[in-house]
Amino acid sequence: MAYNKELAEKVRNLLRNTDGLTEKQMFGGLAFMLNGNMACGVVGEELMVRVGPENYQDALAERYTRPMDYTGRPLKGMVYVEEDAVAADLDAWVSRGAEFAGSLPPK
């Protein structure tokens, strides 16, 4: 699956000064990893964000989000953020994913 390279570049720029940042092809798109833990990524035209189990329901209550169901089953703690929300608040969504991934022990 192709992913929006322009969106990936915007995410890359937001995270460029983050220690432990790597990129990995995952879920048919591009994932941004912090110390081995996925923070966010781009799949198709959407942003995927790892918000964690505690913030999952709050994230789903926001407009333009839906469960990340790449495998056919929702992955609790991960959401897709549609293009409209990404355009309005990309920095906040990327920060949410980076904050959660940064709270996890390095892999």
Image (cartoon, grey):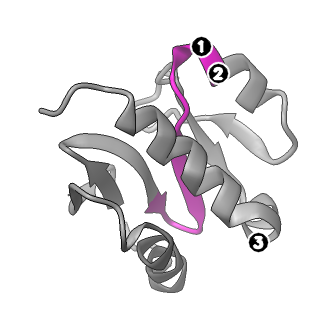
Residue 44 part of the magenta-drawn span: yes
Contact between marks 2 and 1 (CB within 8 A): the answer is yes
x 36%, y 70%: residue: 17
Look at the picture and state if 77 lies above or below 87.
above
Query: What's the residue type where badge 1 is placed?
Result: Glu
Query: What's the residue type where badge 2 is placed?
Result: Asn
Q: Mark 3 or mark 1: which comes first in sequence?
A: 1
What span is colored magenta in the figure?
Answer: 42-55
Residue occupied by mark 2? 55
Q: Residues within 10 Å of mark 1 (few under 14, many from 20)?
A: few
Query: What's the residue type where badge 3 is placed?
Result: Ala
- Which of labels 2 and 3 is toward the front? 2
Which numbered dot is residue 87? Answer: 3
Viewed as shown, does residue 75 lie left or right of 105? Answer: right
* Real-space CA distance between mark 2 and mark 3, rounded to the nearest whole angstrom: 21 Å
* Real-space CA distance between mark 3 and mark 1, rounded to the nearest whole angstrom: 25 Å
